[in-house]
Amino acid sequence: MPSLLLQNIFTLLGLDSLPDDRKQELLDKMTELVQKRLSLRMLNSLSATDASALEDMLKNRSMEDPDVASFFKSRMPNLEEVLKEEIVGLKQELVASVAT
């Protein structure tokens, strides 16, 4: 069985037959949720000094800004692994909610 990370979320949820536009809407919402969870996790991992520096940076930039991304990567070297954990976590929650 392939890793949950690699499995298609719509197949896992039994939603393969949904129209593509509806799948895209759901995928956008799931992506937004993962991004919010990842952001929260990153923010919680920062020191007070780094949090203050980030706050100053975000006065003029968005979370999607390349400089903000570089800031996080430099302070959270395992960022890719954390992202994978958040994706798998969301998939597990969604599969569990469908199973009940």
Image (spheres, grey):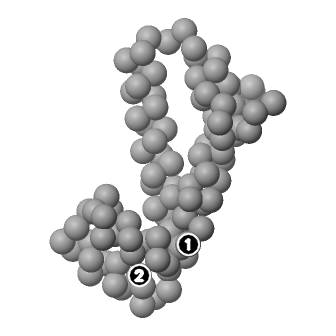
- Residue 88 percent location from the top left of the image: 66, 45
Residue at (61%, 51%) from the top-left corner? 84
Q: Nearer the viewer's eye, disc 1 or disc 2?
A: 1
- Left or right: residue 84 versus residue 50 is right
Determine the secondary structure under disc 1. Answer: loop
Residue on which the image places disc 2:
51
Residue at (64%, 17%) from the top-left corner? 14
Given the current orientation, which residue lies at the most extreme bottom position?
49
Tag 2 or tag 1, which sits nearer the N-term? 2
Residue on which the image places disc 1:
77
- Residue 43 percent location from the top left of the image: 47, 71
Given the current orientation, which residue lies at the most extreme right position?
1
What amino acid does circle 2 point to? Answer: Ala
Relative height, residue 81 to residue 15 (above, below): below
| Number of marks drawn | 2
Determine the secondary structure under disc 2. Answer: helix
Residue at (44%, 71%) from the top-left corner? 72
